[in-house]
Amino acid sequence: MKHTKVKDLLNSTTTLQEVNAKGWVRTFRNNQFIALNDGSTINNIQCVVDFENTPEETLKRITTGAAVSVFGTLVESKGAGQKYEIQVNKLEILGDSDAEKFPMQPKKHSLEFLRENAHLRVRTNAFGAIMRVRSVLSFAVHNYFQQKGFVYVNTPIITGSDAEGAGEMFKVTALPFDNTPRTEDGKVNYKEDFFGKETNLTVSGQLEGETFAMALGQIYTFGPTFRAENSNTSRHLAEFWMIEPEVAFNDLDDNMDLAEDFIQYVIKYALDNCKDDLKFLEGRLLEEEKSKPQAERSEMALLEKLNFVLENNFKRVSYTEAIDILRDSTPNKKKKFSYLINEWGADLQSEHERYLVEKHFKCPVILYDYPANIKAFYMRLNDNTEPGKETVRAMDILFPGIGEIVGGSEREERYDVLIEKMKALEIDEEELSWYLDTRRFGSATHAGFGLGFERLVLFVTGMTNIRDVIPFPRTPGNAEF
C-alpha cells in the first residue's frame, strides 16, 4: 500500500478507509497515542496503538524522533484538537532514535541551541513552519515574474567585478597558500591562478543582469550571493539569496511600482498558501514577546502586520524630506539615536529607517533620490541638482521591524556621465568595458532592484534573527554542517 501524506489524511473527506502513514514520532503518550508528523504540515496526526496486542519490545522503540510506518483505519477522532486519527493495526519501526541522546525533545529549546543543531532543528514545529513558508515564498517569486513575462537569468557566482564597490568579497583562488606566486613588486600573481585574474564570489548579479535586460527587455535573477563583511548581527549573513529584476525602458517610478506590486504579491501568496504555518508562527511570536518590555513589543500581531502591508500603499518620501523629519524628531533631539542626524548627506542607519516606518509614517516607506556620494556608481545622476548636493535616482523600501528590505535605482544610461563617475571613484574602465558596452551600443533608460530573500522570509515569518530563516547560516566564525 502506498503511504499517504499526513496533510492529505487530515484534509480527507472520507473515513473508515485503510491507510498507511509514514513519519517521525513527535510524542508517544500512555503507551498508546503517537503524534506523527511527516513534514507535509505543521499538524500531527494521532495514531492510536493497540498496546495490549503490540510487543513490549516494539513499544519501547516508539520514541521521539523515531521513524515509523503505521497501517490502520482512518476514523473520526474522539479526542479534542484533531479531526481524524488512525486506529493502528500494524506498526513498523523504520529507524530508531535513542531517546536519551536525541536533542529535539518535546520541550522549549532556545534559538541558540537550535542553531547549534541546525541539521535537526527543522524537526521542530517552528523551523518546519519557517522552511515551508520559505519554500512557498520562493515559488511565489518565480511565479510572479514568470506570469509577467520576465526571463530568468542565472548570473555567475564567480565574478571578476565588484558590483557594490564594497571590496568585502570572498576571493576565489586555486593558488597555493605556501609559495604563492608573486610579481616582481611582491603582489600575488593572479596570472598564474585558475582564471588568470583575480576573482571573487559575487555580491550581486546586477551588472550581468543589466546586459541581459538590454536584450531581453525584462529579466530577473534569484541566486546565492556572498559578502565577507565581518558583521555578527541579527540582520547579516555571509551567504544569502538575492532577487534582482532588471527592466529595460523602466524609470525610477516604474521601478517603485514594480517593487511594491511584487512584494504585495508574494506576501499575499504566502498568506493564501501557508495559513496553518503562519498562524502557528503568530502564536509563537506572541508568546516570545510576553517576556519583552511593552515598549519593545510589536504593535501588530504577525498576520495583522502582513495584511497591513497588503492594504496600504507604500509612502514615497524623498531622502531630503526624510532627513528633515529625522533631524526634527524627538529621539534625535533627545539624543536617543545611536547615530544622530545633524546634516544632509548622512547615511541612514537601521534605527532611522525603522523610526520613519514604525513611528512617523506607520506604513511601509519608499525613500528615493539619495545623495550621490553614499550610493553606487551605476545609479543615475539627477539633472539640475545643486553642486555639492548631487542626488541619484535611487530608492530603498523600508519595512517595520526590518528597516531596508529592497534597494534599487534607475541606472545611469549615459555613457559619458558613467565614465566620469567611474573615474572619480577610480573604477577600472578596462575591467568593466563589457558593462560599458551596454551604454555604447543601444543604451536606454533601465532600472532594477535587489531584495534580500532572507529579509523577506524574516518579515513574513515574524522571526527576529536572520540566521533562523536560512537552512544552514554562514556567519563570521561559523560554517558548520
Image (cartoon, rainbow, N blue to C red):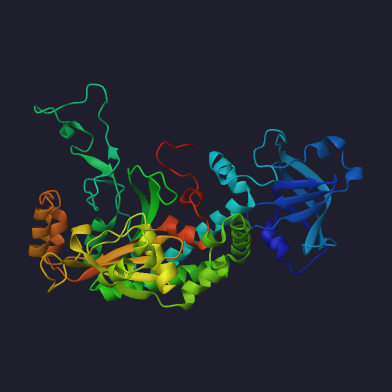
Q: In the image, 32: left or right of 289?
A: right
Q: In the image, 292: left or right of 21?
A: left
Viewer-side residue, 355 vs 27? 355
Judged from this view, the residue extending furthest toward the front is 334
Viewer-side residue, 123 vs 370? 370
Viewer-side residue, 285 vs 343? 343
Q: Position of residue 53 (x, y in %)?
A: 91, 43
Q: Position of residue 334 (x, y in %)?
A: 37, 62
* Residue visible at 22% across and 62% down in the picture: 345
Residue 144 shows in this picture = no
Q: Position of residue 40 (x, y in %)?
A: 63, 56
Residue 222 shows in this picture = yes
* Residue visible at 35% across and 42% down in the picture: 230
Position of 389 relative to 128 (above/below): below
* Residue visible at 78% across and 49% down in the picture: 34
**Residue 398, quarter of the rendered image:** bottom left
**Residue 52, quarter of the rendered image:** top right
* Residue visible at 58% across and 51% down in the picture: 127
Viewer-side residue, 107 vs 224? 107
Position of 64 relative to 376 (above/below): above
Q: In the image, 476: left or right of 111?
A: left
Judged from this view, the residue extending furthest toward the top is 179
Q: Position of residue 243 (x, y in %)?
A: 37, 60
Q: How many marks?
A: 0
Q: In the image, 429: left or right of 110?
A: left
